[in-house]
Image (cartoon, grey):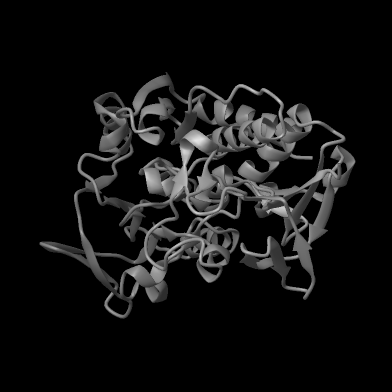
Amino acid sequence: MAPKRVLVIGSGPGGLAFVREALRVLPKDGVEITVVEASRRVVFKPILTYVATGFRDPEDVYVSVEGLEKLGVKAIFDEAVKVDAGERKVLLRGGSEISYDYLVVAAGGEPNEAAIPGLAEANINPWTVEGAVKLREALKGLGDGSRVVVGALRPPYPCPPAPFELAGLVVRVGERLGRKFNVTAVFFEKPPLRALGEEVYTRVLKLLESSGIEFIGGIEATEVDPQGKVLRYKGGEVSFDLLAVVPPFKPPRLLRDSGLAPESGWPAVDPYKGFRHAKYDDIFLIGDSSIAVFRAPMSGFLASHMAQAATAAIARDLGVEVEPPKRAYATCFVDHIVDGAAIFCDFTGVIYGEGKPHCHVVAEGPLTGAYKKAYEDYWKGNVAP
C-alpha cells in the first residue's frame, strides 16, 4: 500500500509541533510528510515586544527552517494560495500543485486593521517584525511627556498579555532614553484579561500601576482619527502621539479564498476529532488558523496541543493507537524588566466545551524575562529544526 501523503502548510509553532509529533508516532513507512512554508525562516513572536522597544535586535526573532529535510520530511519553500478540498490539491504561488491524503493547515491568523476605521493609517502594529522595527524607531523620536497608547481594541489577537508587557517595556525604554513617556493601555475588557480570572487580572493591574501606566478598559472602539491623533470609543476618546495597538485578527486568506473559512468569523473544527474541519475529514486546522472559534487565545502552546491532537487522529486512521493529549496548557509572560509575572493556564474546558480556563500566576518579579528566555531557548533548540 502506498504511504499516505501528509501535507503541512506552515512551519510556525503548530506546524513544527505537528512535524515533530508525526515523526515520533506515525509509522515511517506509512506516511510521507511534506511541509510548505512561504519563507526559509519563521518569526518567534513572543519576543516582538522586546524588538519593538529596543531590548532585542530584529534578527533575534527569526528562526531558520531550512533544516526541515534533515528531520526526514520534504520541504517546499513557496506560498500556498488555494486549497481544492474536493480534488485534495493545494495550489502554490509558483504555479505548481501538490496532492495530499491529509492536509494540516497551520498558517496562522491575519491582522485585520480594516475592522476599525482609521486604524491602519494611524497605527503601528507591533505584532509584525516590520511594525516592531518601525515602533522602536518611532519611540526614539518621541519627546519627553509624549503619550503612547498601546493595547488591544477587539478580540481575537495573539498572546493575550502581550499588550500589557509592551506597555511596561515602553516605560522602560523611555527611562533608558532619559524621558518620561505617558503610557496608556486600552483594552476591550474591564478588568484586563478578565476571562483568565481575578488572580491574573489583579496582578496585571498592579504591574500597570507600579509602572505608572494609565488603564482604560471596557472600551468599544469606533474609529481612529489619524490627522487629529485621537482614538474614539463609545463614551469617550483618548489622544496620542504614538499609537501601537494589536489589531484584531481574522482567518488567513488561504482559508477564506478556499471556502474553508467564512469571510467573517472562524472555521468550524471538531476538537474531539483532532481539530478536523467540520466538512472535510481529511483537513485539520490547527493553531491560530482556528483556535479563536473556541474563544481561546492565540498561543503557540495551544497550537502545539492542537498539533498533537491532529497527529493522534491521523494515527488512529492508520490503525496506530495513540493517546490524544488530555489537557490544553499554556504559559504566558508579562515582563516589565524590573518586575513581571508568568501566568500558567489550563484551557481544556474552553476548547472542549467543559468550562472556564483555570489560570494562576506561577512566578513574579524581575526574573520573569529570564523565564521567558528559557522558553525561547527551549523552543529554538528542541522544536525548530
Task: Identify the residue at image location x=86%, y=41%.
Answer: 1
Outermost residue, left side: 235
In the rendered image of this protein, does residue 319 appear above or below residue 165? above
**In this picture, is 135 found above or below 292?**
below
Query: Of residues 38 and 175, which is closer to you in this image?
Result: 38
Residue 332, position as x, y percentages in the image = 47, 33
- x and y percent of residue 296 in the render? 39, 40
**Residue furthest top as drawn:** 362
Q: Which residue is nearer to you in this view: 185 or 30? A: 30
Quadrant housing residue 3 = top right
In the rendered image, which quarter is residue 372 located in? top right
Q: Residue 67: where, in percent of width, then height?
A: 85, 45
Residue 5 visible somewhere in the drawing: yes
Q: Residue at x 60, y 38 (%)?
A: 310
Left or right side of 56 for 79: right
69 relative to 315, above or below: below
Residue lying at 21% horizontally and 39% vertically, measured from the top left: 191
| Residue at (71, 69) in percent of width and height | 91
| Residue 340 in sight here | no
Numbered circles on residues, count:
0
Residue sitting farthest toward the front: 1
Question: Foreground residue, 263 or 173?
Answer: 263
Location of residue 150 in the rendering, given as x and y in whole percent from the top left corner: 36, 54
The residue lying toward the viewer, choosing from 123 and 311, is: 311
Q: Quadrant of the C terminus?
A: top right
Question: Is 189 left or right of 265, judged from the image as shown?
Answer: left
- Looking at the image, residue 138 sits to the left or right of residue 236; the answer is right
